[in-house]
Image (tube, grey):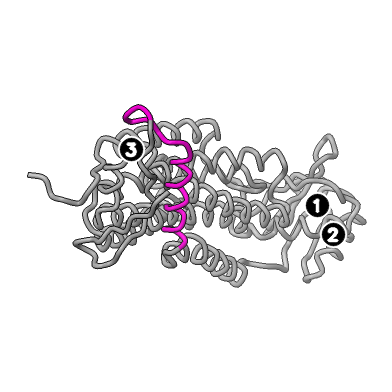
Amino acid sequence: MSTIDTSPTRTGTAARTPVPDNPEGPEGAVPQGQFKALARGMTKELVRDPMALFFSVVFPVLLAGLFVTIMQLTWAGGPYKIAVVGSSSQAAQLQDALGDGSKVTAVSSPRGAPEGTEAVAAPSADGDSLKVVIDPESPSVVSALRDALPQTGWDGRNVDAVGTDGSPPFEPMPFVLPGVLVFALMSLALSATAGTLVSLRANGTLRLLRTTPARPQAILTSLLPARGALGLALLAVAGAVATVLGLLTPLSGLTMLLTTALGMWLLMAVGFLLGGTLRSPELTNAISGLLTPLLLMASGVLFPLELMPDGVADVLSWNPVALLGDALRHDVTGGVTRHAQWLDWLLIAGSAALLTVAAVRAFRWDTEKRN
C-alpha cells in the first residue's frame, strides 16, 4: 500500500488519499482489500473536516435542545377543566393526582360535560384504555392525564386521545425527535457528502483515483461506510432518547431502522447529485445552506404543516422529505401522521431510486467546464 500526495491546482491545499499499489491480475479487477483502503481514506477525510462533523452531529443536537426548551416554555399547562364519565371518587382521585388546581367533574355521559371543559375522559368498553376527547387548543392535557393515571384507579390504561374536530392531538416530543433525526441525516448528506465530493473533484483527487485499477463504483461507494456508521449512531441516540421517554417499542425500533435506511438512501442520493455536478465548494455550501431550511420548512419536519393553509399543507405533505418525517412519526408513540407508513416507504424508495439514477448520469469526475 502506498500513499500519494496530490498537489491541487485550485484549492492550494494537499489531499492525502490512500491509493492501492498496482495489483497483478486481469485489467479492471478489484484488488483484495482495495475497497477497505479507499473507505479508510474517505473516513479520515470526514474526520478531518470539523465543520462537517459539527453540522452533522453537534448542531442537530443543539437544535433539538433549543426546540425542546422553546416547547416546554410555550407548552400550555394546567389547571384544566376535565369531565370524567364515572364515579365521583374516580374524579376526585384524578383531581388529586393532577395537583395543579385542575377541576375534575364526574358526569354520567360525555354530553353532560360542563361548558368550557377541555377534556372528556371515559373508560373504553374493554377497560384497556381511557378514551379522551380534548379541545384542540389544549393538547397538553393529554400529557397531564398520562402522568396522573399511575396515581389513580386507572393505572396501566393507555390514553387514546382525539380532538373534538377528529384530529389527533399534537404532542411536542413525538414531533421533535423525528424532525431532528431528519435534519441530522440531511446535514450528513449535504454538508458532509456533497461538500466533500466537490472538494475531491476540485482538487483532482477523484481524477487521480480514476487512473488506478479501482473501479469507479468502488471509489464513490467508499464514502458510504463512514456516513452510514454516523447515520446509525444518530439513529441510536434518537432511539435511546425515545425509549427513555416511553415513545419507542422494540417493534417500532425495527421499523424506525428501516425508515432511517430508506431516508439515508434518499438524502445521500441528493448529496451525490449535488456533489457530482456543482463546481466549487463555496457554491455547494451556499446551496446546501439555502436548501436545508427550505426543505425543513416545506416538509413539516420541524414546524407542523398544520400551521399552513390546508391546500398548501396537503400538497407539501407529498414531497419526499415530508414523507420521511411522516414515516418516522409512525414509529414513535403519539406521532401525528398523514399517510400510511407503507405508502411513505414506497414513495421514499421510488424517489431515492430516481435521484440515484439522476446522480449517476450527471456525475462528473472533475470540475472542468465542458464545452
At which x and y percent is residue 59?
49, 66
Q: Nearer the viewer, mark 2 or mark 3?
A: 3
Magenta range: 25-47
- For image coordinates 55% across by 40% down, the residue present is 259
How packed mark 1 is, by other alpha carbons closer than 10 Å (few <14, some 14-19, many 20 or more), is many
* Residue type marked 3: Pro
- For image coordinates 62% across by 43% down, the residue present is 331
At which x and y percent is residue 365?
24, 45
- For image coordinates 63% across by 67% down, the residue present is 76
Viewer-closest of 33 and 338: 33
Majority secondary structure of magenta residues: helix
| Residue 137 in which image quadrant | bottom right
Which of the numbered marks, if any, corresponds to residue 84?
1
Viewer-closest of 71 and 22: 22
Mark 3 highlights which residue?
A: 213
* Residue type marked 2: Leu
